[in-house]
Image: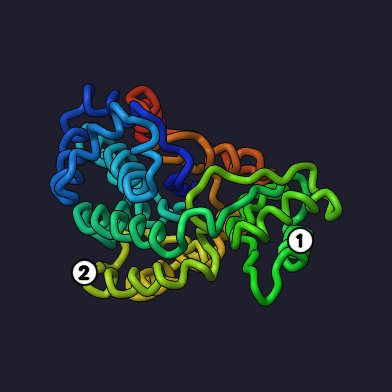
């Protein structure tokens, strides 16, 4: 039976994340300490105590979510003897989660991944002045209808693109704030049930992120990348890659490119994946997979009890 491990993206963070794992497993605590050392910052304190406004800063959110995901991976490996490469046919992650997936597959070290995500968060934040860009979720219409809406809101002056194709009826637009506000106003004309501005500080996964893509090209060029132990399904391709150089190139493209999550789930189904486990914080991706109608059983694995449940089910197969 084929299996995928998937890793969450921005929006799944919460104050208190990681505390239960650190309290129960020294292997999890080690991950959080390694990330703290890599960043020369007590990020774990912000994860556990907040404030929410500080955890919600992109520069902190991205490494924090990766740290929690990798703590789950480390506990599975060290405490339960579950090495991902022995049980996974694919790994995939949503946006920053693709870095977690790459780390879990052995492409980057934990230290390098933390530093890359700190650089990525900073670069994305600086690429566009706050208030100039934004994002909006369009609910209840097809991807094609959202593309038409984006086109209607963009012109020579303003960018508006489909940034995250998450699921049928759930697509996120990104671009200049004026174009996003227009999309919210006219979305119903394109059949949308709702169009909601998202509480984000930048227009992620749009051409406006080009300065950040250039920063990431330079940063990734300085990091040692190893061949993945597990094929990684790329956000920009929605298909699996096993060459580390291609994985790195796709991570650069991903900064300005669309996250093709709906197609990623389709690809998993076509490849015969029957089970998916979301390792880390929240249940966003596992819920999307469950609702996709593709027949993939999905579970969220972020707590000690959920890790134990996953380990038992894998050991019994």
201 horizontally vs 175: left or right: left
| The C terminus: image quadrant | top left
Give the mark count. Answer: 2
Residue 316 seen: no
Residue that carries the numbered disc 2 in the rendered image: 224
Query: How crowded is the residue under tag 1: few (<14 C-alpha within 10 Å), some, or many (20+)?
Result: many
Residue occupying image coordinates x 68% and y 53%: 181
Query: Residue 17: percent from the left, percent from the top?
Result: 34, 30
Secondary structure category for the residue under label 1: helix
Question: Between disc 2 and disc 1, whose residue precedes?
Answer: 1
SS type, badge 2: loop
In the image, what residue occupies the spot 67% across and 77% down? 156
Question: On the rendered structure, is 121 left or right of 139?
Answer: left
94 and 162: which one is in front?
162
Which of the 4 image quadrants contains residue 29?
Answer: top left
Front position in the image: 180 or 297: 180
Please provide percent x and percent y for residue 265.
58, 53
Q: Which residue is mark 1?
A: 149
Q: Position of residue 314 (x, y in %)?
A: 38, 36
């Amino acid at each position: 039976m084929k299996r995928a491990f998937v890793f969450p993206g921005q929006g799944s963070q919460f104050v208190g994340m990681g505390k239960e794992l650190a309290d129960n497993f020294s292997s999890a605590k080690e991950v959080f300490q390694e990330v703290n050392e890599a960043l020369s910052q007590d990020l774990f304190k912000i994860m556990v105590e907040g404030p929410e406004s500080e955890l919600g800063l992109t520069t902190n959110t991205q490494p924090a979510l990766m740290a929690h995901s990798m703590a789950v991976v480390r506990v599975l490996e060290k405490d339960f003897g579950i090495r991902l490469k022995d049980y996974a046919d694919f790994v995939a992650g949503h946006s920053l989660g693709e870095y977690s997936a790459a780390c879990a597959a052995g492409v980057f070290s934990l230290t390098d991944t933390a530093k890359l995500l700190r650089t990525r968060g900073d670069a994305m934040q600086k690429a566009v002045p706050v208030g100039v860009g934004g994002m909006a979720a369009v609910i209840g219409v097809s991807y094609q209808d959202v593309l038409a809406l984006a086109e209607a809101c963009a012109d020579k002056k303003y960018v508006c693109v489909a940034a995250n194709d998450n699921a049928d009826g759930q697509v996120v637009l990104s671009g200049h704030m004026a174009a996003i506000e227009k999309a919210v106003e006219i979305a119903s004309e394109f059949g949308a049930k709702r169009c909601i501005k998202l509480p984000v500080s930048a227009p992620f996964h749009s051409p406006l992120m080009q300065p950040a893509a250039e920063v990431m090209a330079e940063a990734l060029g300085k990091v040692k990348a190893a061949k993945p132990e597990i094929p990684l399904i790329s956000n920009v391709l929605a298909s699996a890659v096993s060459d580390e150089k291609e994985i790195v190139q796709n991570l650069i493209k991903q900064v300005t490119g669309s996250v093709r999550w709906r197609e990623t789930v389709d690809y998993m189904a076509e490849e015969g994946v029957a089970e998916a486990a979301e390792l880390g914080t929240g249940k966003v991706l596992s819920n999307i997979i469950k609702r996709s109608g593709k027949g993939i059983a999905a579970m969220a694995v972020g707590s000690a009890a959920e890790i134990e449940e996953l380990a038992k089910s894998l050991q019994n197969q």
